[in-house]
């Protein structure tokens, strides 16, 4: 039987057993809330995979990383900042499998310095990275990220394979890159392939076929193949769950065939981001105005695309529920509404389709002061937030064992401008 999915209910009054009203009273809005138990259930579903590597770009709060580490999940990092976060969350820099892997298409100076200082394993996405790592640190064990020549995803903006994508080493260039790595003293111990976020089982299976073909070209040191991420989660009630058993069978068969053709043990890694955290996260936002614009009814809230950018970026759909203010418990009829934020920007709409077209949603009739609960917001939510319109970053709370724990304080106005300065020359009287 499928577990109940509360984020698809029209009314949500509790998250992880904690009252939404209590959360709002204690921590204010906008507010990100993560339910650790939902993350744990998703992690348990991946137990059949040998190595689970969390793509922390989906949700890189230190408390979330610390949970992943406690659950035996290793981590992927795509920047110096993500390497630093992983270290701060208690990950060791070295081990087998590598606790932290730096995956990118380039080095910038801060990332290269941290990689060298801590001997972080590198998943190289370009020939230049192979050369630059050798110059900075000498020969290393490395992984090569390969673009198999095709991609897929819920949006072209999340498609990471094929000719239109900047990611990875083009599959026809793999033999040349393996030869370059060997010449520079590197050992290619892994192949990594990721074609996009939100891909389906059919397209994910194509990665298996490409991996079998390319593994023969990886040299004599290959011991790990990475399936990448891209595991989808349902954002709408009618969307099905991924058949994880079938997906695991595909990769187990792939592993066995590669082992047979190479004559040595091969380990499979999987690299989920969204799958582990998306459904655990909620964005709580208070209604401050209800108004009609012609025939369209708007609920205007205090969260905007500075807090959750996915709708304006991809036309992404998020389930939205109502939590009425205390004392208003009577049943209310459903009505068609559009939900917008506070930003001075026409695209600041949570109910929109790709291309910026405003849509509506059936929600219970609400009042000013009620709270909207935006669901499936744990992936690419807070991590993509910004200070646009000089809006402070939202607070974040983790529900752990039924207790709400503050894991990121709300940014203050002083903190908003803390790194800015007005040069003395601009403060002088009579300056032009």
Image: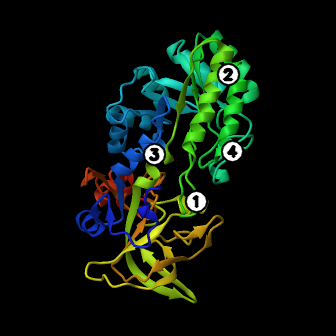
Tell me, yes or no, whether the two marked residues, 1 and 2, touch with CB atoms within 8 Å. Answer: no
Q: Residue at left 30%, top 57%?
A: 410
Spatial CA distance of label 3 from label 1 is: 17 Å
Tag nearer the camera, 3 or 1: 1
* Residue 403 found in image quarter: bottom left
Closer-to-camera residue (124/4): 4
Spatial CA distance of label 2 from label 4 is: 21 Å
Q: Which residue is mark 2?
A: 215
Q: Which residue is mark 3?
A: 276
* Residue 254 found in image quarter: top right
The image shows residue 384 at horizontal and vertical percentages of: 48, 52
Q: Which residue is mark 1?
A: 239
Task: Assign the C terminus to one quadrant of the image.
Answer: bottom left
Of helix, strand and loop, which one carries label 3? helix
The image shows residue 12 at horizontal and vertical percentages of: 37, 69
Outermost residue, bottom side: 294
User: Is 31 above or below relative to 82?
Assistant: below
Q: How many marks?
A: 4
Left or right, 302 with respect to 313, comes to left
Spatial CA distance of label 3 from label 2 is: 28 Å
Q: Is residue 147 among what the camera can see?
A: no
The image shows residue 139 at horizontal and vertical percentages of: 54, 12
Tell me, yes or no, whether the two marked residues, 1 and 4, touch with CB atoms within 8 Å. Answer: no
Q: Earlier in the sequence, mark 3 or mark 2?
A: 2
Q: Earlier in the sequence, mark 4 or mark 3?
A: 4
């Amino acid at each position: 039987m499928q577990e109940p999915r509360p984020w698809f209910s029209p009314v949500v009054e509790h998250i992880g057993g904690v009252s939404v009203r209590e959360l709002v009273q204690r921590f204010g809005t906008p507010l990100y809330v993560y339910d650790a138990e939902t993350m744990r259930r998703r992690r348990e579903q991946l137990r059949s995979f040998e190595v689970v590597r969390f793509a922390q770009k989906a949700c890189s709060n230190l408390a979330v990383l610390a949970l992943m580490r406690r659950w035996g999940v290793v981590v992927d990092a795509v920047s110096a900042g993500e390497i630093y976060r992983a270290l701060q969350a208690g990950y060791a820099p070295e081990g087998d499998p590598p606790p932290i892997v730096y995956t990118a298409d380039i080095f910038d100076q801060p990332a290269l310095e941290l990689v060298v200082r801590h001997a972080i394993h590198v998943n190289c996405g370009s020939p230049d990275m192979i050369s630059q790592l050798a110059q900075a640190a000498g020969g290393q064990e490395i992984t090569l990220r390969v673009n198999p020549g095709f991609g897929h995803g819920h949006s072209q903006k999340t498609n990471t394979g094929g000719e239109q994508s900047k990611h990875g080493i083009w599959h026809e260039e793999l033999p040349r890159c393996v030869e370059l790595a060997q010449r520079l003293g590197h050992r290619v111990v892994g192949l990594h392939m990721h074609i996009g976020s939100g891909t389906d089982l059919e397209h994910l299976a194509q990665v298996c076929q490409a991996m079998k073909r390319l593994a023969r070209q990886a040299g004599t040191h290959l011991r790990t193949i990475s399936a990448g991420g891209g595991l989808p989660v349902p954002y709408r009630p009618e969307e099905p769950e991924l058949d994880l058993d079938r997906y695991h069978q595909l990769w187990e068969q792939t592993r066995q065939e590669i082992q047979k053709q190479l004559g040595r043990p091969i380990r499979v890694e999987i690299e989920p981001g969204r799958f582990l955290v998306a459904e655990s996260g909620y964005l709580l936002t208070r209604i401050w105005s209800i108004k009609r614009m012609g025939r369209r009814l708007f609920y205007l809230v205090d969260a905007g695309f500075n807090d959750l950018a996915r709708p304006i970026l991809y036309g992404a759909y998020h389930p939205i529920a109502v939590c009425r203010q205390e004392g208003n418990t009577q049943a209310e009829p459903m009505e068609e509404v559009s939900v917008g934020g506070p930003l001075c920007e026409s695209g600041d709409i949570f109910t929109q389709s790709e291309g910026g077209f405003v849509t509506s949603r059936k929600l219970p009739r609400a009042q000013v002061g009620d709270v909207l609960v935006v669901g499936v917001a744990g992936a690419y939510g807070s991590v993509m937030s910004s200070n646009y319109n000089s809006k402070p970053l939202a607070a974040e709370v983790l529900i752990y064992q039924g207790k709400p724990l503050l894991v990121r304080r709300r940014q203050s106005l002083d903190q908003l401008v803390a790194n800015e300065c007005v040069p003395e020359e601009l403060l002088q009287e009579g300056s032009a």
